[in-house]
Amino acid sequence: MIFAELKELLDKRSSGGKKGSLPSLNKTAKKLGLLPASYKTALIAGTNGKGTTAFLLAKIAQENGLKVGLFTSPHLFDIRERICVNGKKISKEDFCFCLNKVLSAEGKPLKFFELLTLTALVYFKFKKTDFAVFECGIGGLKDSTNIINSDISIITSVAKDHEKLLGNTLEEIAAQKAGIIKKGKPCVLGQVSPKVLKIIEDTCIKKNAPLIVPKCKNIKLNFAKNTTEFILYDKKYTLNMLGSKAAANGALAISAANILGLKKAIKYINAENFKGRFEVKKIGKKYLILDGAHNPAAILEFLNTYQKSPYFKKENILIYGVSCEKDFKTCTKLLNPYFKKVCLVDFKNSYPKEELKKYFKNCSFVELEALPKIKANIIQVGSFYLFNKLKKYLPKN
């Protein structure tokens, strides 16, 4: 099948979310000769920050001279963004070759995320990568990526999200995230609550897996340079992303790199091509800030950075949209006090914007079509699926 046909097939297989059957997936992977992987691997789970951590770890590995595969989700504009080697997304030709190979080997029809996971594994094997980083889709224990017996696991954070799939309590969600921890393999953990820490610690003890919990300090945000500085293990690092959470994710990536034996000293971590995490763009005399914060914990992190920034003004316009399954009531309650004008956006499986209006008190509403004429700064927060919607209403550069 050609690229357009494969995209249509993937769209049809997307119903039912990312959750599928690991035994069936594992069987197909072994049939294709993908497992065990012939290269080192890292598997990253977490409510927030896993995409950032995955990207940064891949960058550090690449700076150490390795050929590095990176599998992430979701994509912003092109599905091929999910599968990269050394920062370059898979070509259409290779995407078709690898996915068609997976389809030829499947028994029971696989779901969208399962197909993409195997497509990434086929591609990384084909490209002869030295190392690959996989970002979990949802949870960890039952996620498609968990067929990989990774050399290291990273759990970035644990907060409430995807409750229908993962559980209603932090303890239940933590147990799902802990499912990626492998026997005898190290686990790097972000800063979590004592209850969550206990669950991760107990899992590591049962699996004889070393647990590392790095904590960076002296975090300094430089909005003029769009960088964040921090100290980790008595060394100073600079990351060209903004936010305390960015520093925490950087600390996880650096710690994992050290454990994996990536010894080349990295003082400056270049995240230039990583999009949608307090990403600042200048458009004429105004600024556009793009942030994929889509659950309460992420919204709080965004607001923490936003309030400290020089872009924080009451007249700014908020662009917001949210998937149906998200806790939109808490998210809108957190955002409401900081904005007077709001532009609400619908997309596939989003909570209807006409209903969302009820949760923004004392706000006026504008439409996407009006954005080019507006002089105020534009702040986009919410689902990553908003990015494509916004793109057509802004200058191409």
Image (cartoon, rainbow, N blue to C red):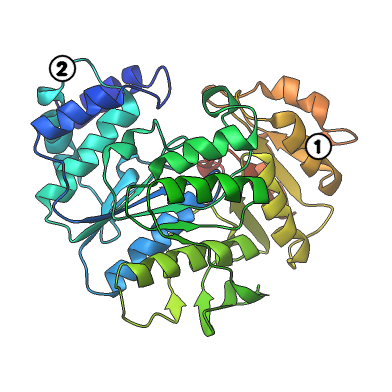
In this rendering, is residue 267 above or below 135?
below
Q: Is the residue marked by circle 1 packed among few (<14), some (14-19), or many (20+) residues within 10 Å?
A: few
Question: Please, what is the three-letter code of the amino acid marked with disc 2?
Answer: Gly
- Decide which of tag 2 and tag 1 comes sooner along the chain: 2
Q: How many numbered badges does the structure rendering display?
A: 2
Residue 129 found in image quarter: bottom left
As drawn, the label of residue 202 is none
Closer to the camera, 286 or 171?
A: 171
Q: Is residue 319 left or right of residue 279?
A: right
Residue 32 found in image quarter: top left
Q: Name the residue under label 1.
A: 333
Closer to the camera, 42 or 10?
A: 42
Q: In this view, does 50 lie to the left or right of 278?
A: left
**Which quadrant, please, contains the N terminus?**
top left
Q: Which residue is drawn at 62% across and 53% down?
A: 192
Residue 45 found in image quarter: top left
Question: Please, what is the three-letter code of the amino acid marked with disc 1?
Answer: Lys
Q: Residue at x 66, y 51 (%)?
A: 194
Q: Is the residue marked by circle 2 packed among few (<14), some (14-19), or many (20+) residues within 10 Å?
A: few
Task: Report, in whole angstroms, how far the alpha carbon at label 2 lies from the one at label 1.
Answer: 46 Å
**Residue 343 x/y as whole percent:** 71, 36
Q: Residue at x 21, y 15 (%)?
A: 108
What is the secondary structure assignment of the residue under circle 1?
A: helix
Q: Is residue 111 left or right of residue 201?
A: left
Q: Mark 2 points at which residue?
A: 107
Closer to the camera, 227 or 375?
A: 227
Depth check, mark 2 against mark 1: the one in front is 2
**Residue 187 x/y as whole percent:** 42, 56
Closer to the camera, 79 or 392?
A: 79
In this rendering, is residue 348 above or below 41?
above
In this rendering, is residue 332 above or below 304?
above
What is the secondary structure assignment of the residue under circle 2?
A: loop
